[in-house]
Amino acid sequence: MRNWSVLLFFPVVLMCQPEPPAPALVRGVLLEHDPQTAKGEFSVRRDDNHVLRYSFDAKTYVERDSQPIEVSRLEPGEKVEVLSDEGPATSLRYARTVHVLAPAPVTRTLTQGRLRAYRTPVERLLPAAPLSFSGVIFGLSNSQVKVHTRQAGDQTFLLRQDTRYVEDGDLVDAGALKPNLRVFVRAGRTLYDDIEAYQIVWGHILLPSQRGK
């Protein structure tokens, strides 16, 4: 009887042992992050499927392709390396630096967006049917931009390799896009009825159709 008591007690002791602390340097896949840019949390899944959560603030350094970015520009699915230490008053570890090691796996939306530079031969047979929208950016990623418009509500635009970005009349990189920017978008529909952005304009100089409004 005593032996059975020992056997039953042994797994309980194992379950009550504290989980080993997370290492300072972790590599894994980003699962999600808070939309805030100043302060919040994000989670990473390691290769052993163990999920770790981290806190971040404005001092957390985030880098992709040797360029500093904000936490809000990180994409779920990206492989990242996180250097962290113990938080001052929380069980979460504080992320000092986050380096993006590899991009997120390609999905159909991404393929139809950034990775496709030109219209397919089938799409060239379709009417161009250009669309125009104006509004304020409320969501942003490497493959798409979300704009709140007054005339059509919230719209999601896929970004292409040949999407043109114009700020104050000058061509700029996609990295110049920021949340809360008021933009004018020229776009068109794909075979899948998604909307692709051909040109995004903001600043003091807009397209002629926007002048005087």
Image: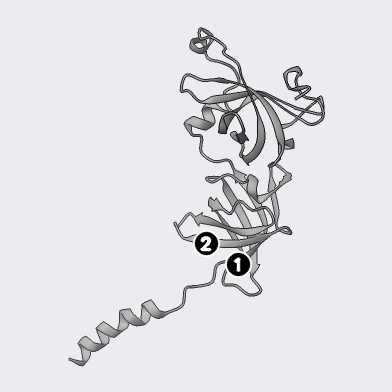
Quadrant housing the C terminus: top right
- Amino acid on which the number 1 mark rests in the picture: Arg
- C-alpha separation, residue under disc 1 versus residue under disc 2: 9 Å
| 196 and 13: which is toward the camera | 196
| Residue displayed at 60% across by 16% down | 130
Q: Quadrant of residue 7?
A: bottom left
Q: Relative to residue 183, is residue 187 depicted above or below?
A: above
Q: Residue furthest bottom?
A: 2
Where residue 9 sits in the image (x, y, percent)?
A: 29, 85
**Residue 166 located left or right of residue 122:** right
Residue marked by disc 2: 52
Q: Relative to residue 29, is residue 17 depicted above or below?
A: below
Residue marked by disc 1: 93
**Residue 96 located left or right of residue 30:** right
| Residue displayed at 72% across by 57% down | 58
Badge 1 or badge 2: first in the primary sequence: 2
Q: Residue furthest top?
A: 125
| Residue displayed at 53% across by 51% down | 32
| 66 and 142: which is toward the camera | 142
